[in-house]
Image: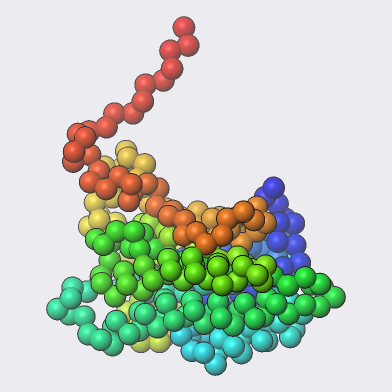
Amino acid sequence: MLGPDLLEGKVGLVTGAGTPYGIGRECVKKFAAAGAKAIYACDLNTSSISSLQEECKRAGYATIIEGRLLDVSNEEQTVAIVREITKIHGRFDFCIANAGFANYRNLNDTEMVHYDRQVNVMTRGVFLAIKYGSQAMMVTSDLKPQPGGTFVVTGSCAGFSGAYSDLPYAVAKTALHGMVSSGSAHLSSSNIRVNGVAPGFTKSSILTVSKDAENGEYKNDLDEDQLKENHMWFFERAGLLKSPEYFYNRLQDPSEIASVQLFLASDLSSCINGQMILADSGKTAAATGDACTGPIPPIKPLDLS
């Protein structure tokens, strides 16, 4: 069951956890609430980690939360962080490969440098996490007598439909389906599971910081309310605000995605492996919305007479 001992004693890292508002930050909070011993919150900017630590402390979580600068596309940095964690704590149990960015460009405006950076961060970065994180998960100690662990990769609804993003982002995220599926098979003799969650339209910092993140850095100079407001134009353009009565048009909170990440990282999902879970409130399944069906009325309550 969900509770403060779900991840008791477990140690790992979350990438893309440095913004003041987003999936990565919420993931750290969820894992801390679940009793993780130590979480390394990694990103290109760690200036908001202190507020994350304070927030978790106020909530009464005993989890050690460390902030670390990390460009996930950099092999040397990736090796260094998993080695540091494993040496200090004698174990490495979970890796949440969440780092990413999204800039919407048409193909005329897309240069190879844009394509290369997206693939490097969101595909190569995940490969590096799996390659070296899995080695760290095989290290045993008195605290961890049996090897094993879990990976949770952040995909995207853009991996399920071609109209959600620009082309490089769709390529980078769709590749993760193969990474998750094949990774689960290649790690099947190592007691390591690999799964992913593909968020739909979720409130976060991604559209605010992506332009700078594409260049390898970003600033944390906006508060949570400003970051939320910065996303509204995109949700409006996507048509989510036109028919809010439909569940598939709801705006998801990052904490909802973090709940799926926690489930996949825990033993509650022990029979799930090699899966990319689409978490988009049914938006992709709804496809054309009510264009073909006409307006969809709510179901009438059961007559109890």
Residue 190 is at least partly visible in this image:
yes
Judged from this view, the residue extending furthest toward the bottom is: 76
Q: Is residue 91 left or right of residue 95?
A: right
Q: Is residue 62 left or right of residue 106?
A: right
Q: Is residue 60 above or below residue 149?
A: above
Front residue of 233 and 95: 95
**Residue 155 is drawn in which quadrant?**
bottom left
Judged from this view, the residue extending furthest toward the left is: 108
Q: Is residue 177 left or right of residue 12?
A: left
Q: Position of residue 172 (x, y in %)?
A: 36, 74
Q: Residue shown at 18%/76% (left/top)?
A: 107
Q: Residue shown at 76%/67% (left/top)?
A: 9
Judged from this view, the residue extending furthest toward the top is: 305
Q: Residue shown at 33%/47% (left/top)?
A: 285
Front residue of 153 and 58: 153
Q: Position of residue 25 (x, y in %)?
A: 53, 67
Q: Is residue 229 left or right of residue 292?
A: right
Count of all numbered marks drawn on residues in the image: 0
Front residue of 254 and 150: 150
Q: Residue shown at 54%/55% (left/top)?
A: 260
Q: Is residue 77 above or below residue 14?
A: below
**Residue 219 is drawn in which quadrant?**
bottom left
Q: Position of residue 6 (x, y in %)?
A: 71, 56
Residue 69 is at least partly visible in this image:
no
Q: Position of residue 46 (x, y in %)?
A: 53, 81
Colouring method of the image: rainbow
Front residue of 176 and 107: 176
